[in-house]
Amino acid sequence: MKEVDSLALANVQLNQEKAFRDYFKNPKHFGMPKFKKKKDKQSYTTKNQILPNGNETIRVDFEEGFIYLPKIKEGIKAVLHRGFEGRIKSVTVVKTKSGRYYVSILVEVQDPRNEIKEPSNLVCGIDLGLQHFATIANDVGVFKVEYPKYLIKAEKRLKRLQRQLSRKEKGSRNREKAIKRLAREHEHVKNSREDFLHKLSKAIIDDNQVVVVEDLNIKGLARTKFAKYILDSSWSKFLDYLCYKAKWYNRLLVVAERTFPSSKVCSRCGHYYVGLKLWERVWECPVCGSVHDRDENAAKNLRGYGAVLIKEIG
């Protein structure tokens, strides 16, 4: 226990208290706290303190590329993602299943606002799908973002690594190596997906003042035969990224009601086509004769939903 930073132990105790408090308050939503497995992701958080001699317990040397943490005598060589200015409040050290270490640093700054760009479009509507990850309709036109299929493309390699792992003897060195290889491949898929979601959500927020999305029942869709593709797309995480980035950059994120028939309404004349089937990707409006791509029509209707809302707000 003496080898561990005291504030790191205090943070573990606080997290444990919160976990038990949440469980007893709402056991249906929060599960019983469990011990961390040594082979799973490990992490700890510690706070920065000012010592009597004026030095801080947590320091970053940007010139040499070292991070100094409490109870560690020598600096740790690290690849620094970017520089920052301000006083360090706390750090979280994470060890992933693949054996990689990451340090997340919380810094107190005077002006936490990000640089805001002038949007080139007023309103955009986003329709999420499986054939294309997203169909976006804005002031310029309609364009589609391809579904990257990170998990689908890595599926063969993941299956091969899983078979190799199943043949290894439990407790052996070769099994540990196989576990790390499999974890490294899963981590690559996860990082690739999150990189795509971050870049796409940032581009959408930069270009549009108002972003309109659907209120999707993702948990329900995840129980269908398309579950693998839906979970690989990470729609929920993409919507979360849009939400917090909209707050950062002073944008408005509008979530259309789940009952809003974005696909079944003609974006040209407003006719509600009740007979539209789920498998129909292209349909013709029986009133005005317009031929619609299902996803493009939905994106246009969502954009119109946001435009009407803006007029009502004034």
Image (cartoon, helix red, strand yellow):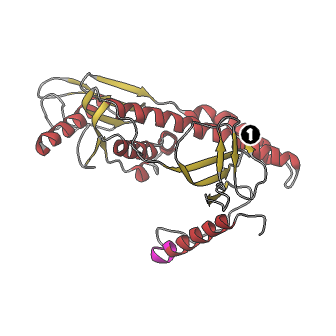
| Residue shown at 46% from the left, 45% from the top | 237
Residue 83 image position (x, y, % from top left)? 57, 37
Q: Position of residue 108 (x, y in %)?
A: 49, 51
Q: In the drawing, does residue 178 fall left or right of residue 212? A: right
Q: Amino acid at mark 1?
A: Leu
289 part of magenta stretch: no
Q: Quadrant of the C terminus?
A: top left
Position in image of residue 5 (x %, y %): 70, 63
Q: Is residue 264 left or right of residue 236?
A: left
Of residues 97 and 57, which is closer to you in this image?
57
Is residue 295 visible from the viewing direction of this image?
no
In this rendering, the answer to whether 22 lies above or below 309 is: below
Q: Where is mark 1, residue-wise? A: 161
Asked where in the image residue 56 lies, by quadrant, the reply is: bottom right
Res 279 → quadrant = top left
Residue 129 position by quadrant: top left
Residue positioned most to the front: 53
Question: Relative to 234, does residue 116 appear above or below in the rendering?
Answer: above
- Please determine whether, in this image, residue 10 is positioned above or below residue 240: below
- Does 307 sit left or right of 171 as displayed? left
Mark 1 element type: helix
Residue at 13% in and 34% down: 270
Neighbour class for label 1 at 10 Å: few (<14), some, many (≥20)?
some
Q: Is residue 306 visible?
A: yes
* Magenta span: 22-27
Q: Residue furthest bottom?
A: 24
